[in-house]
Image (cartoon, rainbow, N blue to C red):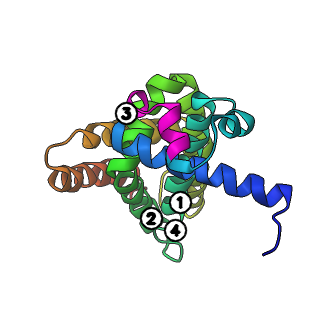
């Protein structure tokens, strides 16, 4: 059997820690998971966790960043070949669906703002989801579909509305119904941005 290089061993160990911790955090919440739980599930030592991540907080931040990227990827792939308006609407739907899946909602919406702090959480969210929203809005304005206006305020308004909706949906007793109603309301808001025909 071939011996692993240091880089390969590092990649395997960090992936094992990320996967183990993410599963535990998603099921039990950050506060209920100990370092001992994480390393036992990952099959590594506490020394390895501290070597690669420096502790539970740093490991959690890496998981939050990864989850944000995954949600952004789902938004980007929601309707990649469609015209920009459909990309906007389907991207919003993909964001809400992905953000409110139980494991993702526990990590991104329940634990991350309190564990990392609002500013760090907001920064990670902005890095992952705002560029796609910005780009599609610019394309819609360039095409004349949306009345030209300053893009940055619109991006922040829509992003904030969707984050708030995702947090509300995360606690909904009837997620499917409330998701449908949220999308109907959001589509009405988006339609108001359209240029007069």
Q: In this figure, which residue is indicated by the disc labeled 4?
A: 77
Q: Are discs 2 and 1 less than 8 Å apart at CB?
A: yes
Q: Secondary structure at mark 4?
A: loop
What is the spatial separation of the Cα atoms under label 2 and label 1, in whole angstroms? 7 Å
Judge whether residue 35 can be spotted in this image. yes
Q: Secondary structure at mark 3?
A: helix
Q: Are discs 4 and 3 less than 8 Å apart at CB?
A: no
Q: In this figure, which residue is indicated by the disc labeled 3?
A: 110
Q: In this figure, which residue is indicated by the disc labeled 2?
A: 85
Stretch in magenta: 29-40
Q: Earlier in the sequence, mark 4 or mark 1?
A: 4
Q: In this figure, which residue is indicated by the disc labeled 1?
A: 140
What is the spatial separation of the Cα atoms under label 1 and label 3, in whole angstroms? 33 Å
What is the spatial separation of the Cα atoms under label 2 and label 4, in whole angstroms? 14 Å
Q: Secondary structure at mark 1?
A: helix
Q: Earlier in the sequence, mark 2 or mark 4?
A: 4
Q: Estimate the x, y position of residue 67 in percent, counting from the top left.
A: 52, 49
Which secondary structure is most common in the magenta stretch? helix
> Is residue 195 located in the magenta-colored stretch of the structure?
no
Q: Earlier in the sequence, mark 4 or mark 3?
A: 4
Q: Estimate the x, y position of residue 131 in percent, counting from the top left.
A: 61, 49
Q: Earlier in the sequence, mark 2 or mark 3?
A: 2
What is the spatial separation of the Cα atoms under label 4 and label 1, in whole angstroms? 18 Å
- In the image, 3 versus 184, the foreground residue is 3
């Amino acid at each position: 059997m071939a011996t692993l290089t240091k880089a390969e061993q590092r990649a395997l160990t960090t992936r094992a820690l990320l996967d183990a911790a993410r599963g535990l955090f998603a099921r039990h919440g950050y506060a209920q998971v100990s370092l001992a739980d994480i390393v036992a599930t990952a099959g590594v030592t506490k020394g390895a966790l501290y070597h690669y991540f420096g502790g539970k907080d740093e490991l959690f931040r890496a998981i939050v960043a990864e989850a944000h990227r995954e949600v952004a990827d789902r938004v980007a792939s929601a309707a990649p070949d469609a015209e920009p308006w459909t990309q906007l609407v389907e991207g919003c739907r993909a964001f809400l669906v992905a953000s409110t899946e139980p494991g993702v909602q526990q990590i991104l919406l329940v634990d991350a703002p309190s564990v990392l702090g609002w500013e760090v959480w907001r920064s990670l969210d902005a890095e992952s989801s705002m560029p796609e929203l910005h780009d599609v809005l610019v394309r819609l304005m360039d095409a004349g579909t949306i009345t030209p206006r300053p893009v940055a305020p619109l991006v922040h308004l829509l992003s904030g509305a969707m984050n708030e909706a995702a947090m509300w949906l995360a606690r909904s007793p009837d997620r499917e119904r409330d998701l449908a109603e949220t999308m109907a309301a959001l589509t009405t808001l988006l339609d108001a941005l359209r240029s007069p025909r």
